[in-house]
Amino acid sequence: MLDVHSRVGDLPATVETLESCRVSWGRVCSVERGELVVDREPLRLVDGKLMLDAPRRERVVRQIGGRGFADNALVGDWVSLHWGWVCEVLTERQRANLERYTRHHLAIANHTL
């Protein structure tokens, strides 16, 4: 999960690249045409360790040309995100699993930083 950026070529090895590349989750705050506004927990580097920061409000792409993967997303739904794009509406179980495995992989990554 956190090592993909080094395998795909010319992407810089930064927290911003890791953050964009990791599949994350966010709670929908508003639906605005082809975009959603979500609250999501971004990656942060603190004292040389990666961690999830407090939720931050962000605007993400839901549709292009009226089409997307989460056209039915509503306020209050959880959605998955990748490179600023909404991938799908998540069930609570899917969101919890994504968070659990993200935290697990952050712990592994932090052993090697």
Image (cartoon, grey):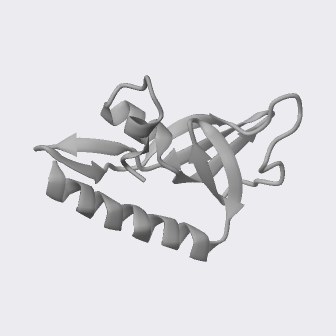
What residue sits 48% from the left and 34% below the top? 8
Q: On the picture, is 91 further left or further right than 73?
A: left
User: Residue placed farthest to the bottom in the image?
Assistant: 93
User: Residue placed farthest to the right in the image?
Assistant: 66
Q: On the picture, is 66 further left or further right than 33?
A: right
What residue sits 75% from the left and 55% below the top? 74
Q: On the picture, is 54 further left or further right than 77?
A: left
Image quadrant assignment for residue 19? top left
Q: Tell me: residue 40, above or below residue 5.
A: below
Counting from the top left corner in percent of width and height, residue 56 is at 44, 42
Counting from the top left corner in percent of width and height, residue 75 is at 70, 54
Image quadrant assignment for residue 60? top right
User: Residue placed farthest to the left in the image?
Assistant: 47
Counting from the top left corner in percent of width and height, residue 94 is at 59, 71
What residue sits 32% from the left and 31% below the top? 13
Q: Tell me: residue 13, above or below residue 86.
A: above
Q: On the picture, is 43 further left or further right than 4?
A: left
What residue sits 43% from the left and 53% below the top? 1
Q: Nearer the viewer, residue 13 or 95?
A: 13
Counting from the top left corner in percent of width and height, residue 44 is at 28, 42
